[in-house]
């Protein structure tokens, strides 16, 4: 059960992180300084947490799966969300 919780935690973190990365890319491309700065802060904070979490573990296959799956799903979600945010700004 602990491995499943760790897998799901890393999945959720990566989902959020990659979503924020997609929004950050759009903010940089559209020169939105404040949004880029806020998203950079969130990205760095989440990366710090993930590094600490993984560095303390010995058996990492379940963590790898959650990390990778969350990244893929987060990219899809982040692209969709960044398009929605951009269309609201127009």
Image (cartoon, grey):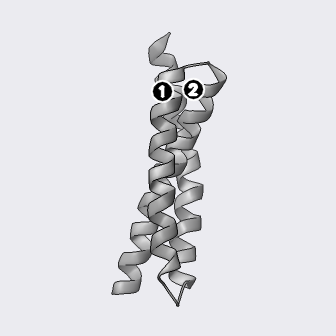
Q: Is residue 14 visible?
A: no
Residue at horizontal 57 percent and vertical 84 percent from the top: 61
Residue at horizontal 57 percent and vertical 75 percent from the top: 64
Q: Is residue 31 visible?
A: yes
Q: Residue 40, how many percent across, how many down?
A: 52, 39
Q: Earlier in the sequence, mark 1 or mark 2?
A: 2
Left or right relative to 13: residue 27: right
**Residue at the right extreme?**
29
For label 2, the crowd category at 10 Å Cα-Cα, with few meaning under 14, some 14 to 19 and many 20 or more, is: some
Residue 3 badge = none
Q: Residue 80, how many percent across, how many down?
A: 53, 36
Q: Are marks 1 and 2 in contact (CB under 8 Å)?
A: yes
How far apart are the two marked residues, 1 and 2, measured between alpha carbons? 6 Å
Q: Quadrant of residue 79?
A: top right
**Picture layout, residue 51 above or below residue 89:** below
Q: Quadrant of residue 28?
A: top right
Q: Secondary structure at mark 1?
A: helix
Q: Residue 70, how many percent across, how many down?
A: 52, 61
Residue 35 badge = 1
The residue under label 2 is: 27
Left or right relative to 53: residue 73: right
């Amino acid at each position: 059960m602990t491995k499943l919780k760790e897998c799901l935690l890393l999945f959720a973190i990566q989902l959020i992180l990659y979503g924020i990365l997609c929004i950050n890319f759009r903010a940089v491309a559209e020169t939105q300084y404040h949004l880029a700065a806020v998203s950079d802060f969130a990205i760095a904070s989440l990366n710090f947490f993930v590094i600490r979490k993984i560095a303390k573990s010995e058996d990492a296959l379940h963590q790898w799966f959650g990390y990778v799956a969350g990244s893929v799903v987060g990219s899809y979600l982040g692209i969709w969300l960044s398009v929605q945010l951009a269309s609201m700004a127009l």
